[in-house]
Amino acid sequence: MAKGIVGHFTEFVGRRIKNGRKAAKMSPEDLAKRIGVSPLVLDHMERGYCHVNLEQMMQLARHLSLSLEELLGIPHHEENEILEFLNKRILAMSEEELRAWQQNVQPLAEDGRRIYILDIDLDAE
Protein backbone atom coordinates (compact mmCIF):
# COMPACT_ATOMS: atom_id res chain seq x y z
CA MET A 1 0.00 0.00 0.00
CA ALA A 2 1.40 3.40 -1.02
CA LYS A 3 2.12 5.97 1.66
CA GLY A 4 -0.06 9.06 1.72
CA ILE A 5 0.82 12.66 2.39
CA VAL A 6 0.35 13.52 6.07
CA GLY A 7 -0.97 17.01 5.35
CA HIS A 8 -0.53 19.98 3.05
CA PHE A 9 1.79 21.84 5.42
CA THR A 10 3.92 18.72 5.96
CA GLU A 11 4.15 18.32 2.18
CA PHE A 12 5.06 22.02 1.84
CA VAL A 13 7.85 21.75 4.45
CA GLY A 14 9.08 18.58 2.74
CA ARG A 15 9.42 20.44 -0.55
CA ARG A 16 11.35 23.21 1.19
CA ILE A 17 13.68 20.60 2.71
CA LYS A 18 14.24 19.01 -0.71
CA ASN A 19 14.80 22.39 -2.41
CA GLY A 20 17.19 23.44 0.37
CA ARG A 21 19.12 20.20 0.06
CA LYS A 22 19.42 20.62 -3.70
CA ALA A 23 20.47 24.27 -3.34
CA ALA A 24 23.17 23.15 -0.90
CA LYS A 25 24.26 20.52 -3.48
CA MET A 26 23.93 17.82 -0.84
CA SER A 27 23.00 14.21 -1.52
CA PRO A 28 20.03 12.70 0.32
CA GLU A 29 22.37 10.17 1.94
CA ASP A 30 24.71 12.90 3.24
CA LEU A 31 21.91 15.03 4.68
CA ALA A 32 20.21 11.99 6.23
CA LYS A 33 23.47 11.02 7.94
CA ARG A 34 23.99 14.56 9.25
CA ILE A 35 20.54 14.75 10.86
CA GLY A 36 20.64 11.19 12.16
CA VAL A 37 17.97 9.50 10.05
CA SER A 38 18.02 6.91 7.28
CA PRO A 39 17.86 8.02 3.64
CA LEU A 40 14.39 6.43 3.49
CA VAL A 41 13.15 8.57 6.39
CA LEU A 42 14.60 11.70 4.73
CA ASP A 43 12.84 10.71 1.50
CA HIS A 44 9.57 10.41 3.43
CA MET A 45 10.17 13.84 5.02
CA GLU A 46 10.82 15.42 1.62
CA ARG A 47 7.66 13.88 0.18
CA GLY A 48 5.47 14.84 3.14
CA TYR A 49 4.86 11.23 4.13
CA CYS A 50 5.96 11.76 7.74
CA HIS A 51 6.17 14.56 10.28
CA VAL A 52 9.47 16.24 11.07
CA ASN A 53 10.09 16.75 14.78
CA LEU A 54 11.53 19.97 16.18
CA GLU A 55 15.02 18.56 16.74
CA GLN A 56 15.15 17.31 13.15
CA MET A 57 13.85 20.66 11.91
CA MET A 58 16.63 22.48 13.77
CA GLN A 59 19.25 20.07 12.40
CA LEU A 60 17.89 20.52 8.87
CA ALA A 61 17.98 24.30 9.17
CA ARG A 62 21.57 24.21 10.46
CA HIS A 63 22.88 21.83 7.78
CA LEU A 64 21.00 23.58 4.96
CA SER A 65 22.13 27.04 6.18
CA LEU A 66 18.51 28.19 6.50
CA SER A 67 16.62 29.75 9.37
CA LEU A 68 13.63 27.89 10.79
CA GLU A 69 11.45 30.66 9.36
CA GLU A 70 12.86 30.05 5.88
CA LEU A 71 12.43 26.30 6.22
CA LEU A 72 8.83 26.72 7.37
CA GLY A 73 8.09 29.38 4.75
CA ILE A 74 7.31 32.10 7.27
CA PRO A 75 8.13 35.50 5.82
CA HIS A 76 10.53 37.67 7.78
CA HIS A 77 9.96 41.39 8.08
CA GLU A 78 12.21 43.95 9.72
CA GLU A 79 10.81 45.79 12.73
CA ASN A 80 10.66 49.11 10.83
CA GLU A 81 8.61 47.43 8.06
CA ILE A 82 6.12 46.09 10.62
CA LEU A 83 5.83 49.49 12.34
CA GLU A 84 5.30 51.22 8.99
CA PHE A 85 2.54 48.74 8.11
CA LEU A 86 0.83 49.18 11.50
CA ASN A 87 1.03 52.97 11.29
CA LYS A 88 -0.59 52.92 7.84
CA ARG A 89 -3.36 50.64 9.15
CA ILE A 90 -4.00 52.85 12.18
CA LEU A 91 -4.05 56.05 10.09
CA ALA A 92 -6.55 54.42 7.72
CA MET A 93 -9.01 53.69 10.58
CA SER A 94 -12.07 55.80 11.05
CA GLU A 95 -12.50 57.53 14.42
CA GLU A 96 -15.12 54.94 15.38
CA GLU A 97 -12.86 52.03 14.46
CA LEU A 98 -9.96 53.61 16.32
CA ARG A 99 -12.06 54.09 19.49
CA ALA A 100 -13.30 50.50 19.32
CA TRP A 101 -9.74 49.24 18.82
CA GLN A 102 -8.41 51.32 21.75
CA GLN A 103 -11.19 50.06 24.03
CA ASN A 104 -10.48 46.43 23.23
CA VAL A 105 -8.45 45.49 26.29
CA GLN A 106 -9.05 41.75 25.96
CA PRO A 107 -5.73 39.92 26.37
CA LEU A 108 -4.37 38.44 23.16
CA ALA A 109 -4.23 34.95 24.71
CA GLU A 110 -8.03 35.01 24.93
CA ASP A 111 -8.44 36.21 21.37
CA GLY A 112 -9.34 33.19 19.25
CA ARG A 113 -8.48 34.89 15.97
CA ARG A 114 -5.14 34.06 14.41
CA ILE A 115 -3.50 35.05 11.17
CA TYR A 116 -1.16 32.57 9.53
CA ILE A 117 0.78 33.74 6.51
CA LEU A 118 2.89 31.26 4.63
CA ASP A 119 5.12 32.06 1.72
CA ILE A 120 3.94 29.10 -0.34
CA ASP A 121 5.47 28.39 -3.70
CA LEU A 122 3.60 25.27 -4.79
CA ASP A 123 5.30 25.14 -8.18
CA ALA A 124 8.85 25.00 -6.80
CA GLU A 125 10.41 21.56 -7.01
Image (cartoon, grey):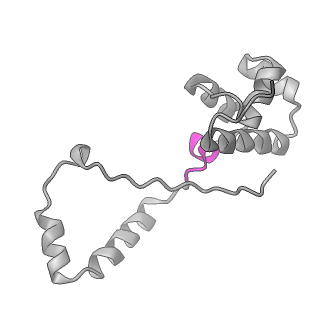
- The x, y position of residue 91, in whole percent, is 28, 80
- The x, y position of residue 9, in whole percent, is 61, 43
- The stretch of residues the image draws in magenta is 68-74
Q: Quadrant of residue 99?
A: bottom left
Q: Quadrant of residue 110?
A: top left
- The x, y position of residue 50, in whole percent, is 67, 27
Q: Residue at x 64, y 56 (%)?
A: 120
Up the image or down, 72 lies above or below 93; here it is: above
Q: Tell me if 70 is positioned left or right of 124 in this view.
A: left
> For this rendering, which residue is in front, 24 or 43?
43
Q: Residue at x 16, y 82 (%)?
A: 95
- The x, y position of residue 51, in whole percent, is 63, 28
Q: Residue at x 58, y 40 (%)?
A: 68
Q: Residue at x 80, y 24 (%)?
A: 1
Q: Main secondary structure of the magenta part?
A: helix
Q: Quadrant of residue 94?
A: bottom left
